Amino acid sequence: MLYYLIKNFFLAPYIRSTFRPWVSGTENVPVTGPVILASNHISVLDSLFLPLSLKRKVTFLAKSDYFTGKGLKGFVLRSFMNGVGQLPIDRSGGKASEASLGTGTEVLRDGGILGIYPEGTRSPNGKLYRGRTGVARMILEAKVPVVPVAMFDTDKSMPIGAKIPKVRRVGIVIGEPLDFSRFEGLEGDRFVLRSITDEIMVEIARLSGQEYVDVYASSVRRTAAAA
């Protein structure tokens, strides 16, 4: 109930009148049933604009830091993330990351829409980076289609490091569903998982027009931070 109140009576009217987002391909999202939305990730605003463009609820896996802040600011951010349907994901690796992926799989088994960023983190420079294979494993385990998505200009509205978004028009292109049922039962094969993930990233690159770089975005960000 809180999700729909925030979305339909507070956020949606403000976003549509202020940022005037354009959206293409909403007909490619199934009306019912589980599906994964796999999107590029260029701004924190992506997790806001994409769900507001669809009638169905979209649950995103968001980094756990958003849910652990202290004080009034932490409470407000945590309440907002919960209110817009976000679930915390631990990206520290190992069993913690496995448990987080299990949370996403449960959303799918309940018939919901799961939003995920295969790159694992925001692009540091607007390019599209190598996808993590967790998305492929969820596709095969939950036996669901995946819909590729491309976000446009959200990074210009709110780039990395910005505290307040600039008002400018942003866009969303939703591609046709991809079916990987031919790989059913092979979720334990790392070569299959990599093949599926790469196919998804190729389609996102086609939709977004971004330059694709076959390294992980997190590695690029660590290198830049160290420099």
Image (spheres, rainbow, N blue to C red):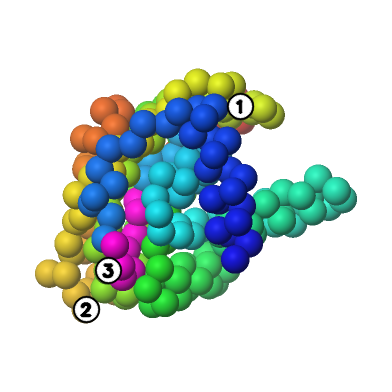
Does residue 224 appear in this view?
Answer: no
**Residue at the (76%, 49%) spot, across then down:** 76
Does residue 42 appear in this view?
Answer: yes
Secondary structure under the numbered disc 1 in the rendered image: loop
Which residue corresponds to mark 3?
Answer: 144
**Residue at the (59%, 21%) spot, across then down:** 166
**Residue at the (28%, 37%) spot, across then down:** 24
Image coordinates of residue 46 in percent, x first then y, are 48, 40
Q: CA distance from mark 1 to mark 3?
A: 34 Å
* Quarter of the image where the N terminus is located: bottom right
Between label 1 and label 3, give the one nearer the viewer. 1
Between label 2 and label 1, give the one nearer the viewer. 1
- Decide which of tag 1 and tag 3 comes sooner along the chain: 3
Horizontal placement of 157 versus 127: left or right? right
Secondary structure under the numbered disc 3 in the rendered image: loop
Q: Which mark is residue 165?
A: 1
- Decide which of tag 2 and tag 1 comes sooner along the chain: 1
Image coordinates of residue 164 in percent, x first then y, are 67, 27
Extent of the magenta region: 31-38
- Decide which of tag 3 and tag 2 comes sooner along the chain: 3
Which residue corresponds to mark 2?
Answer: 185
